[in-house]
């Protein structure tokens, strides 16, 4: 199972905006001002995004998903390099490869409809035929993994109960299906034991407190493996593919998450791996010979590769400078595939022979029309908020911005709650910076990656303390010699979109304009309409934000929709019509209400998108419209020369 790039995988199904990528955590000195070529949105869209690498059974090809065709499809490429081949040809729905059959050339992929997140699992045979293995009228299905003996694979679906993801075993030849675990508690499903005798489940008590449970297949009983006092997060890192040992990730008794496994004393856990930052993922190779961990280091990600037999850490050499955000092994454990990127160059896939260290780049994703020297490196910066709390950020400074040529600025708020602005290549941010905007990617209190105290600091305080961090961010920007403090926008998506609306409503003079991308306007409705397949996690969100049944007055107080009369600054709203997390009505109503104030409001509704952008044409439209909106209100036209 690969270590996915997106941190949302380890933060549970929140309202998350797709995160900024990852790159080397060390910041570089601010470069001197230099001429910088300005690029069109089409030139930026010439870059390709790749993700989810999977080796074929023979290790000769690497499968991955790519939006080279304008939407994500499955591609394959020889591990020695060559031209990628498209294996699926969807023009309407994004496709992500999730598995390759261990003994032949079939593959599995997940696909929804127009971003509605109602994913089905498909099999593709070598002759190009595709079959839906989960032809449900309603429901969600996800791939979980192959059995130890390769005779079957596991999936989860909520077709029996919309609020419970059950585990099924499918025969690898016939696709005949049997129920393995009935998940009546609605817990998250983490994995199946090698002997299929038990299934690991995850309970989210709150967004920062959780347990791991063991479901016994024979007796259909549950056992809490992680009883604890106080607030502590326990979740599954991986299950050892041979011994069946559970490797968990927990912050119980520590500020940062670490890896533990069962100790000799029953009911106890022993430390396996620690860091000075959160370990966010750890996973084994096919036989357990290797284990790879991802560590969230100061808005970036570091990778540790462990030789489990030798008990040593293996240095990853012969790779270009950059950040590895995905790492998977071939089935025979002789090759390692990584996804590597930097702030100024898009992510590419590399394959390394672990014996010879020979490394081959197998994708070429950067737009040929972009010169990376014209793009910018992020700087890690901090400022003190209203109460003295240190707030970390990523700062992107345009090459042309100087004390003599001050630039407008944007406070960019990530999704969540509990997301993180991380380093790496991002077309949208680089596009805005390339066109003269300073961008500050804020990690307000409540963001992941800075320890559990910082993560919990926004609980039941949404619309208040974390929002004040964003207001203080404007003051920080105004203190920079190359920023025009009279021209500052706030922008964000999902939870970040909520922060935009909240800033305009509750601090109406703090920002000059706002850009809200599928943001929450009414917490009462959003919390009640959370997708049923989130199961028990719904209660965790109630603990984090507020219970719509018990805290109606408080949730109305922090919901911008009930305070629209205070919004007086120009607003641009983007919404996907198929969004299951933030419903279209959230944007429809805020737009209609703000227009009544006589405030300039622009609304872009995308009929074929959900919670995020899966199609390049839509991404380009949003980027272009956003820049036009910002330029209109933050870059007034120069006064015309007097007539002679």
Image: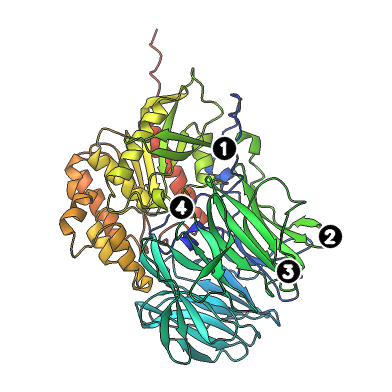
The residue that disc 1 covers is: 39
| Cα distance in 3D space between marks 4 and 2 | 39 Å
User: Against 115, is 562 above or below?
Assistant: above
Q: Position of residue 149 (x, y in %)?
A: 66, 86
Q: Is residue 450 visible?
A: yes
Of all residues, the one furthest to the right in this rendering is 356
The residue that disc 3 covers is: 309
Give the mark nearest the N terminus, 1 or 2.
1
Element type at marker 4? loop
Question: What residue do we see at 60% from left, 49% from top?
Answer: 46
Question: What residue do we see at 29% from left, 33% from top?
Answer: 510
The answer to which quarter of the image holds residue 104 is bottom right
Q: Which mark is residue 270?
A: none
The residue that disc 2 covers is: 356
User: Against 566, is 241 above or below?
Assistant: below
The residue that disc 4 covers is: 255
Label 1 packing within 10 angstroms: few (<14), some (14-19), many (20+):
some
The answer to which quarter of the image holds residue 86 is bottom right
Tag 1 and tag 2, C-beta contact below 8 Å:
no
Question: What residue do we see at 35% from left, 49% from top?
Answer: 457
């Amino acid at each position: 199972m690969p270590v996915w790039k997106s941190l949302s995988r380890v933060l549970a199904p929140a309202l998350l905006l797709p995160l900024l990528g990852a790159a080397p955590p060390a910041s570089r000195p601010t470069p001197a001002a230099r001429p910088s070529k300005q690029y069109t949105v089409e030139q930026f869209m010439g870059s390709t995004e790749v993700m989810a690498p999977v080796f074929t059974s023979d290790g000769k090809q690497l499968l991955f998903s790519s939006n080279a065709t304008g939407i994500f499809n499955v591609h394959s490429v020889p591990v020695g390099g060559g031209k990628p081949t498209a294996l699926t040809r969807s023009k309407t729905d994004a496709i992500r490869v999730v598995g390759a059959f261990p003994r032949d050339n079939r593959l599995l992929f997940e696909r929804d409809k127009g971003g509605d997140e109602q994913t089905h699992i498909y099999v593709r045979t070598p002759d190009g035929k595709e079959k839906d293995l989960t032809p449900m009228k309603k429901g969600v299905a996800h791939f979980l993994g192959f059995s130890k003996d390769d005779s079957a694979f596991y999936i989860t679906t909520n077709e029996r109960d919309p609020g419970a993801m059950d585990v099924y075993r499918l025969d690898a030849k016939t696709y005949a299906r049997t129920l393995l675990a009935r998940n009546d508690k609605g817990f998250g499903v983490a994995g199946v034991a090698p002997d299929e005798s038990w299934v690991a489940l995850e309970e989210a008590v709150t967004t920062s407190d959780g347990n791991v449970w063991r479901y016994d297949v024979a007796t259909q009983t549950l056992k809490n493996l992680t009883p604890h006092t106080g607030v502590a997060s326990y979740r599954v890192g991986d299950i050892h593919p041979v011994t069946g040992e559970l490797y968990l990730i927990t912050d119980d008794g520590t500020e940062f998450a670490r890896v533990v496994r069962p100790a000799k004393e029953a009911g106890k856990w022993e430390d396996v791996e620690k860091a000075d930052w959160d370990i966010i993922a750890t996973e084994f190779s096919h036989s357990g010979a290797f284990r790879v961990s991802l560590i969230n280091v100061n808005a970036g990600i570091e990778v540790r590769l462990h030789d489990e037999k030798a008990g040593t850490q293996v240095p990853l050499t012969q790779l270009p400078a950059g950040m590895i955000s995905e790492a998977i092994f071939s089935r025979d454990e002789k090759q390692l595939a990584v996804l590597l990127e930097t702030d100024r160059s898009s992510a590419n896939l590399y394959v390394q022979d672990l014996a010879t260290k020979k490394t081959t780049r197998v994708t070429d994703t950067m737009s040929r029309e972009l010169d990376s020297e014209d793009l910018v490196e992020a700087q890690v910066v901090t400022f003190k908020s209203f109460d003295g709390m240190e707030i970390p950020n990523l700062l992107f400074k345009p090459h042309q911005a100087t004390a003599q040529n001050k630039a407008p600025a944007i406070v960019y708020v990530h999704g969540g709650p509990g997301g993180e602005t991380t380093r790496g290549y991002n077309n949208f941010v680089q596009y805005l910076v390339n066109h003269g905007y300073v961008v500050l990617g804020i990690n307000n209190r409540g963001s992941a990656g800075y320890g559990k105290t910082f993560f919990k600091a926004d609980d039941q305080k949404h619309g208040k303390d974390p929002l004040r961090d964003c207001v203080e961010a404007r003051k920080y920007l105004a203190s920079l010699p190359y920023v025009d403090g009279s021209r500052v926008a706030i922008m964000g998506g999902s939870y970040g979109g909520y922060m935009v609306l909240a800033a305009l409503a509750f601090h109406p003079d703090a920002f000059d304009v706002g850009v809200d991308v599928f943001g929450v306007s009414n917490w009462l409705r959003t919390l009640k309409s959370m997708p049923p397949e989130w199961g028990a996690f719904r209660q965790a969100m109630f603990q984090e934000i507020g219970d719509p049944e018990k805290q109606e007055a408080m949730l109305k107080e922090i919901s911008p929709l009930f305070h629209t009369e205070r919004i007086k600054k120009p607003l641009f709203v983007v919404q996907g019509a198929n969004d299951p997390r933030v419903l279209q009505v959230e944007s429809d109503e805020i737009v209609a209400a703000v227009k009544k104030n006589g405030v300039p409001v622009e609304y872009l509704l995308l009929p074929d998108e959900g919670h995020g952008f899966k199609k390049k044409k839509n991404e380009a439209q949003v980027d272009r419209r956003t820049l036009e909106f910002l330029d209109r209100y933050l870059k007034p036209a120069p006064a015309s020369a007097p007539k002679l």
